[in-house]
Image (tube, helix red, strand yellow):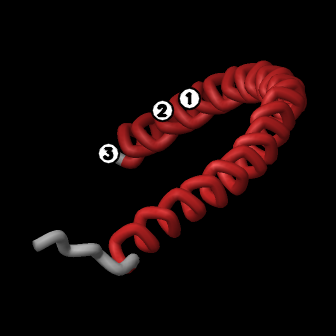
């Protein structure tokens, strides 16, 4: 009975050796994912150049919006002045 338990105890050693080979494989996969991460970093650098252009456009839009709002304020003032101007009533 002691011999049987010894054989049973030895078999898990073979199972423990197998996962070591499996653990080696993900290391190669991780190396590949590191390279893909480097590529994604390069893409992000390119995206930075793309995001700079919309920022310049928004500055132009802001300047246009300020001009448009000042024009609309003037037109609103005219409308308010028209409403508050004295009305001549004809009998």
Q: Which mark is residue 14?
A: 1
In the displayed structure, would residue 7 be above or below residue 80? above
Q: Are dots 1 and 2 in contact, CB under 8 Å?
A: yes
In the displayed structure, would residue 40 be above or below residue 13? above
In the displayed structure, would residue 55 be above or below residue 31? below
Q: Which residue is at the front of the view, 19 or 6?
A: 19
Tally of marks: 3
What separation in Å lies between label 3 and label 2 (alpha carbons)?
16 Å
Q: Quadrant of the N terminus?
A: top left
User: Residue 81 location in percent, x, y?
Assistant: 45, 73
The residue where tag 2 is placed is 11
What separation in Å lies between label 1 and label 2 (alpha carbons)?
5 Å
The residue where tag 3 is placed is 1
Q: Is residue 34 visible?
A: no
Residue depicted at 34% across the width and 72% down the height: 83
Q: Element at badge 2?
A: helix
Q: Earlier in the sequence, mark 3 or mark 2?
A: 3
User: Residue 65 location in percent, x, y?
Assistant: 66, 50
Graded by Cα atoms within 10 Å as few (under 14), some (14 to 19) or many (20 or more), the crowding at tag 1 reads few
User: Residue 18 location in percent, x, y?
Assistant: 59, 26
Q: Which residue is at the front of the view, 23 or 66?
A: 66
Most extreme residue toward the front, as rendered?
A: 91
């Amino acid at each position: 009975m002691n011999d049987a338990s010894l054989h049973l105890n030895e078999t898990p050693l073979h199972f423990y050796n197998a996962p070591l080979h499996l653990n080696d494989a993900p290391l190669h996969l991780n190396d590949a994912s590191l390279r893909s991460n480097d590529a994604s970093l390069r893409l992000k650098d390119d995206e930075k150049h793309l995001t700079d252009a919309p920022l310049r456009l928004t500055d132009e839009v802001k300047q246009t919006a300020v001009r448009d709002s000042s024009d609309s304020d003037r037109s609103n003032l005219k409308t308010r002045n028209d409403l508050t101007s004295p009305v001549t009533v004809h009998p």
